[in-house]
Image: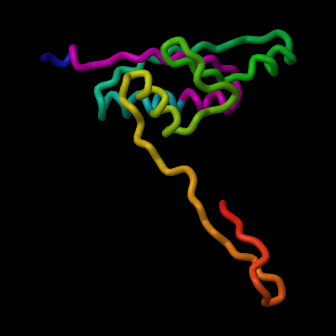
């Protein structure tokens, strides 16, 4: 099997305006693309598209930046974190992202004036 057969391609379209958030989103997409190519052989083709508005209200409605992965809108109105972006691209490739523990249970007893516990809270 040669190198060309191992490379998987993903297309990431980034719709941008000229805000700081759009700049941050584009930089993160480039960072993740480079990392995925080096570590996993995933070729990420990035298509930046700057959207111009004549009406300021139009810009608010558009909610940029928007990030599409293989034609599907995945992130809108914010620059995603590097781990979220990497997970979204790896899902499209077919590699499931590593699961992480997002919730835990902590028990707490509340005492009122040294008496018996009034309540038990779980978070």
Q: Where residue 34 appears, x then y in whole percent?
A: 38, 30
The image shows residue 30, relative to residue 61, as above or below, that is: below
Residue at coordinates 40% horizontally, 41% vertically from top-left? Answer: 98
In front: 8, or 33? 8
| 50 falls in the magenta region | no
The image shows residue 7, relative to residue 109, as above or below, that is: above
The image shows residue 28, relative to residue 58, as above or below, that is: below
Residue at coordinates 74% horizontally, 22% vertically from top-left? Answer: 63
Q: Is residue 41 left or right of residue 44?
A: left
The image shows residue 85, relative to residue 107, as above or below, that is: above
Q: Quadrant of the N terminus?
A: top left
Q: Where residue 3 appears, x then y in whole percent?
A: 18, 19
Residue at coordinates 44% horizontally, 32% vertically from top-left? Answer: 32
In front: 64, or 90? 90
Q: Where residue 16 appears, x then y in whole percent?
A: 65, 20
| Colour scheme employed for the rendering of this structure | rainbow
Q: Is residue 7 left or right of residue 61?
A: left
Q: Which span is picked out in magenta?
A: 5-26
Q: Where residue 17 appears, x then y in whole percent?
A: 69, 20
Residue sitting at the far bottom: 114
Residue at coordinates 38% horizontally, 22% vertically from top-left? Answer: 93
In front: 8, or 34? 8
Q: Quadrant of the C terminus?
A: bottom right
Q: Is residue 114 left or right of residue 65?
A: right
| 25 falls in the magenta region | yes
Residue sitting at the far front: 116
Q: How many numbered callouts?
A: 0
């Amino acid at each position: 099997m040669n190198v060309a057969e191992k490379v998987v391609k993903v297309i990431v379209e980034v719709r941008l305006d000229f805000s700081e958030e759009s700049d941050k989103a584009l930089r993160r997409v480039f960072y993740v693309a480079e990392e995925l190519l080096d570590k996993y052989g995933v070729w990420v083709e990035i298509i930046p598209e700057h959207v111009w508005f004549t009406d300021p209200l139009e810009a608010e409605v558009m909610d940029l930046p928007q990030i599409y992965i293989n034609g599907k809108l995945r992130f809108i109105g914010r620059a995603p974190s590097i781990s979220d972006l990497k997970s979204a691209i790896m899902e499209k490739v077919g590699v499931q992202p590593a699961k992480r523990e997002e919730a835990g249970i902590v028990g707490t007893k509340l005492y009122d004036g040294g008496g018996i516990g009034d309540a038990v809270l779980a978070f």
